[in-house]
Amino acid sequence: MNDTCFDLLVIGGGASGACVAYEAISRGLKVALLEGHDLSGGTSSRSTKLLHGGVRYLELAFKTADTAQLRLVREALLERGHWLKQAPFLAHRLELALPTEGLIGQLYYRFGLGMYDALSGRSGIGSSRLLSRSLLHEALPDLRSDVSGGVAYSDGQFDDARLNLLMALSAEQHGAVVRTRTTVVELEKDSHGKVCGAISESADGRRERWQARVVVNATGIHSDALRRMAEPGCQERMLTSRGVHLVLKQRLCPQHIGLLLPSTDDGRVLFMLPFFGRTLVGTTDTPCSQTQAAVPSEQEQSYLLDYVKRWFPDLNSIDIGSCWAGGRPLLKPADADVNSSRVVREHEVETLPSGLVSVMGGKWTTCRPMAVDTLTAVAEQLGQSLPPAKELPLIGSDADPLQTPRLLIAQRSTLQELLPKSPRQSEQIEHLENGHGLNAAALVNSWSEEEREPLSTVMPVCRGELRHAVQKEKAKSVTDVLARRTRLAMVDRDEAQRLAPVVTEILEQCGQGDSTPLELKL
């Protein structure tokens, strides 16, 4: 049993849990983070990969005169700017084209996107612009010929799984205890009925006690299960909506300008985005049970493919490299019944009478405000104010994040000397820097020449990178390595399956028992 008493025990290693741990460590708290599976193993690795305020939410805010929605868009746009600055190797600006119908449609969206730009203030990343027919078809050459023009605007695109991972590992580097494959099976209470810790069970059946002054529930779509563990009679607050994504082998966005369809037949927004040299298509929005959250239906896949065919009708064939689904944690108002459709994308931090603090709802882009609000509730439970946050650079970034882009450029000459001389060397350099930032050169220098050789033409992963994922990044299965530490399985499942034996061999060499064949449940 663990004799350490932590200030804060965070349960859940997705974006919200990792960010709570990261922010708590920066404020001097003693933190433990427990994850029942893999870091970002659920919803947090299955997003649309956009850091955005939400064009759809802005439109709704104006149509319904909802100032709360407007505030949410503003908050998300500021957070978009934060992550683009803090992790420039994981996140980058992405321009998206929004096709319009006629002059009125073009002016409508141009005005709306001008407001979107204005809301970002000093965190803006580029002004929206009109696209003539020729500019639009130059950016998206396979787009159907009757589209006469559009508007382009900017948002952020990022590697969700690696940002999640690096927040957790950065917290660990500065003193947090981070455990994966460690499931909480019981919450402990003191003589006053207050939650004071938890009992966990590891994959090998070993149980351990975790004492903590405050326990935070950051389990996303599974939040109600832990809330019921604390107070069996508490009202359920979560609903789940499944979002399905396809990755097409076709490169429909050759100039790295994505496509936003602002209104489908059923009123949804659809994206077609550049993604590792291929095209990411998403997303659906289907109410489902928690058990079905990661299971794409044939109907949803057909729905997405139908829109690809509508907008790119001259494609001879459509080849799917990968498909995955994730469950959005939709938060019901506290006074709503279990079947209510009154769900929002806002977040809420709840403190039950037993003292369990739960952070619920929200979206990836706003994980940091969610974490800060959670720590406000934690401070109330501790009965003390928390000190200001210290600067805590993300692993792979410089102590001064503004210097990171310059240093990444300087690092490339070192990587050119270290990596195999081949036509794909520049691609491998970009790949390694995108995953490891300023640590890329030191990592490559620690690998043998054989370990530096690319193993795939789809993505230039190498054996050294795969071994590092197992030895230093808590990867314990083939899926951990190929779907989340690298994104190969998210891009091309068949290619990931081909490399599964290589990863299995590395897992066995590193003493990991969970080296089962690749079962990509995305």
Image (cartoon, rainbow, N blue to C red):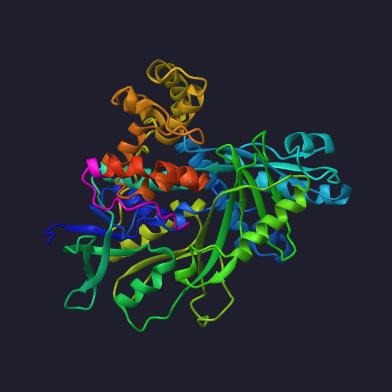
The part of the image, by quadrant, that contains residue 274 is top right
Report whether residue 278 is seen. Answer: yes
Residue at screen point 42% across, 81% down: 235
Viewer-side residue, 167 vs 455: 455
Q: Is residue 344 left or right of residue 175?
A: right
The main secondary structure of the magenta stretch is loop
Q: Residue at x 33, y 82 (%)?
A: 232
Q: Residue at x 24, y 71 (%)?
A: 187
On screen, 132 above or below 220? above
Q: Quadrant of residue 243?
A: bottom right
Outermost residue on the right side: it is 103
Residue 517 inside the magenta-drawn segment: yes
Horizontal relation, residue 311 to residue 344: left or right = right
Q: Position of residue 122 (x, y in %)?
A: 59, 39
If the image is split into quadrants, where does the N terminus sit? bottom left
Quadrant housing residue 437: top left
Residue 175, position as x, y percentages in the image: 23, 45
Where residue 489 appears, x then y in whole percent?
Answer: 47, 46
Q: Is residue 369 visible?
A: no
Labels in figure, total? 0
Camera-side residue of 150 and 453:
453
Percent coordinates x, y for residue 366 in the rendering: 49, 53
Front residue of this view, candidates 418 and 343: 418
Q: Give the residue drawn at x 49%, y 73%.
A: 289
Q: Is residue 322 magenta?
A: no
Q: Which residues are magenta?
A: 508-522
Position of 242 relative to 52 (above/below): below
